[in-house]
Image (cartoon, rainbow, N blue to C red):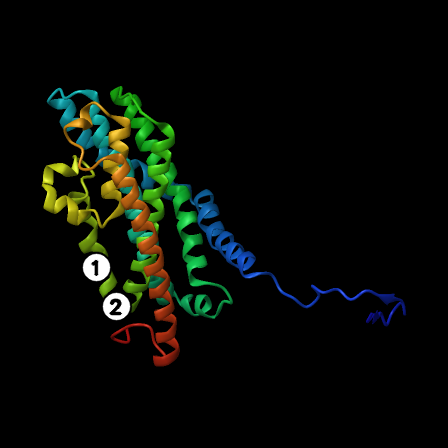
Amino acid sequence: MSVILDKHTAVEREPNPRRGKGPSAFTIFWRSVIGRAYPRVIGIQRELSWLFFDIFLPFMTTMSYVLVYEAIGAPASYKGLVLVGGAMTAFWLNVLWSMAMQLYWDKEQGNLQLYMLAPTSRMAILTGMALGGLFSTTIRATIILIGGSLIFGISYQATSWLALIGVFFLSLIALYGMGMLLSSIFLVYGRGAWQMTAALQEPVFFVSGFHFPVKALGTVVATGASIVPLTLGLDAMRQLLFPEMMQQFQFLSVGSEAAILAGLALFFGLLARWSLQRMERKSRQDGRLTERGN
């Protein structure tokens, strides 16, 4: 049996098989996630004015849609339908501006080189961004939902809270997977990312049925809009929260929508991984990341 001689104590010691080995890939991944999420969570506490504007102004926008139903004397469930959609808009905006645009902004600020050189996965960095942004976004969505429900007296009759939570998380996983994919695409197209972000914001509000049941757009449009995970996620959550009203407005069954959301989560996750790896290869081969060199 081999031994190691400590030069200071001159005592024979058993060799440590783990000595010289670094942390595992799994450990590095989750350390990167936590390290990147931390600044976004702490940043809210250091600049509370951001939290005010991120919550109060979107709250007013959602209330304006709810007041339309209030003015025509619609049942509370119709107002609840709009309120749920208004709360979920926070997640779409977070994906567009805090995920899809993030790598482009980091490039402009000179931080992208650090991400590319860091001995960790780019998906770990983006996952940390997603979890950090999810913290403030969830606060915003919760306040909109609870505040609007109290003001307008909206009650919910969930058929299954477990199914509701499951659909909600499936929607977020698929949505943030889509955000990871968009982040690499927007970075490659450089300054055109601003135009793409603006072009995707309002149209998705419309075709995804944030303020009305997506079935109203017709089967063809609703099917095309289902590429955005929140389209099916919203429809499923509304069916679970307002079962009686949604019997005439449902697009697909909750089970079918949950299965499609699981497929979209896997699809966007794999596609984002491939896109980020391709982006890294391009940076090594061409010495740049954007198509136009901007």
**Can you give x and y, in whole percent of width and height, for residue 203 in the image?**
16, 49
Q: Amino acid type of disc 1?
A: Met
- For the residues labelled 1 and 2, the Cα–Cα distance comes to 9 Å
Residue 84 is labelled as none
Q: Secondary structure at mark 1?
A: helix
- Mark 2: give few (<14), some (14-19) or many (20+) Cα within 10 Å: some
Position of 129 relative to 277 (above/below): above
**Can you give x and y, in whole percent of width and height, for residue 46 in the image?**
46, 45
- Which residue is at 31% across, 25% downward? 159
- Which residue is at 41% across, 57% downward? 126
CB under 8 Å between discs 1 and 2: yes
**Is 18 in front, or is 192?**
18
Q: Looking at the image, which residue sits at the far bottom?
A: 286
Q: Which residue is mark 2?
A: 189
**Can you give x and y, in whole percent of width and height, for residue 292 in the image?**
25, 75
Residue 196 is labelled as 1
Q: Is residue 175 visible?
A: no
Q: Amino acid type of disc 2?
A: Tyr
**Is 133 in front, or is 47?**
133
Q: Quadrant of the C terminus?
A: bottom left
Q: Quadrant of residue 20?
A: bottom right
